[in-house]
C-alpha cells in the first residue's frame, strides 16, 4: 500500500449490508455442483475392454484394428434413469477404431468417458423396452460395410468423435 492509502481492509459485504456477491469459494462450489449435476452418471455398471485385431479397416490399410468390447448385464434402473425401479436389458456391443495415433487417442477418450459414466445410458427403444444404449456417441459397430454410418470407411470419423467427446467435456 502507498503511504497515503488507508491501511483499513474492507470487504464488499461490509459496505453493502451483507448483500454483496457470495464468496468466491461459494461461487466455485455452486458452479461445480451445477456442472456435476449436468454430467451425473447415468450409465449403468458395465465393462469396457479392447484388443488388437491383425486386420485393417477400410480407409486405414496400413493399421491394425482396435476392437472395443462393451458389456452391460441386465439390471434395474436407478433414479438417474427414465424409469427408476424397472428392469432394463443389458448390452454386448463391439466398436472399432484404427490402431494408429488418432485411433488410440479416441480410445483413451472413450475409456475416460466410460469410467465417468458418459458413453452409455438407459433408453426406451421403439418397442417400448428399456435397454442400454450409446448416449449420443456414434460408435462404429461394424468394421466394414460401405456407406453405413455404423461402419468404415469414414475419413472424418476420428475427428468428429473427438469433437463429440470434447462437447461432453471428455478431453
Image: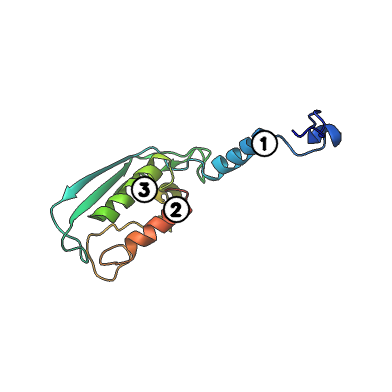
Disc 2 from disc 3: Cα separation:
9 Å
Residue sticking out furthest to the top: 8
The Cα atoms of the two marked residues, 1 and 2, are separated by: 27 Å
Callout 1 secondary element: helix
The answer to whether 137 appears left or right of 36 in the picture is left
Please give the name of the residue rendered at 70% of the width and 34% of the height, measured from the top-left corner. Answer: 23
Residue 104 position in % (x across, y down): 28, 50
Q: Which residue was labeled with disc 2?
A: 166
Q: In the image, which is nearer the foreground, mark 1 or mark 2?
A: 1
Location of mark 1 (residue):
24
Is there CB contact under 8 Å for labels 2 and 3?
Answer: no
Give the vertical position of 108 relative to 2 (above or below): below
In this view of the protein, which residue sits in the foreground, 131 or 17? 17
Query: Which mark sits nearer the N-terminus, 1 or 2?
Result: 1
The residue identified by callout 3 is 109
| Observer-nearest of 39 and 12 | 12
The local crowd at label 2, few if under 14, some if 14 to 19, many if 20 or more residues have their Cα within 10 Å, is few
Instruction: Depth check: give the residue in front, 99 or 122.
Output: 99
What residue is rendered at 33% in x and 59% in y? 158
Q: Earlier in the sequence, mark 2 or mark 3?
A: 3
Say whether disc 3 or disc 1 marks the residue closer to the N-terminus: 1
Residue 53 location in percent, x, y?
A: 16, 51
Q: Is residue 147 left or right of residue 34?
A: left
Image quadrant holding the N terminus, namely top right
Q: Position of residue 16 (x, y in %)?
A: 85, 37
Along the line of sight, the residue nearer the viewer: 168 or 70: 168
Figure coloring: rainbow
At numbered mark 3, what does the secondary structure look like: helix, strand or loop? helix
Which of discs 3 and 1 lies nearer the camera? The answer is 1
Amino acid at each position: 500500500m502507498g503511504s497515503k492509502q488507508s491501511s483499513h481492509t474492507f470487504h464488499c459485504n461490509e459496505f453493502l449490508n451483507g448483500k454483496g456477491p457470495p464468496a468466491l469459494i461459494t461461487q466455485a462450489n455452486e458452479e461445480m455442483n451445477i456442472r456435476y449435476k449436468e454430467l451425473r452418471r447415468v450409465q449403468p455398471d458395465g465393462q469396457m475392454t479392447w484388443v488388437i485385431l491383425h486386420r485393417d479397416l477400410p480407409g486405414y490399410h496400413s493399421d491394425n484394428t482396435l476392437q472395443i468390447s462393451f458389456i452391460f448385464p441386465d439390471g434395474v434402473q436407478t433414479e438417474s434413469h427414465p424409469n427408476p425401479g424397472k428392469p432394463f436389458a443389458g448390452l454386448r456391443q463391439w466398436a472399432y477404431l484404427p490402431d494408429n495415433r488418432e485411433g488410440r487417442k479416441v480410445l483413451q477418450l472413450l475409456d475416460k468417458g466410460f469410467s465417468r459414466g458418459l458413453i452409455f445410458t438407459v433408453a426406451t427403444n421403439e418397442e417400448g423396452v428399456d435397454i442400454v444404449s450409446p448416449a449420443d456417441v456414434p460408435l462404429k459397430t461394424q468394421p466394414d460395410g460401405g456407406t453405413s454410418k455404423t461402419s468404415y470407411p469414414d475419413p472424418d470419423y476420428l475427428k468428429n468423435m473427438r469433437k463429440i467427446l470434447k462437447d461432453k467435456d471428455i478431453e
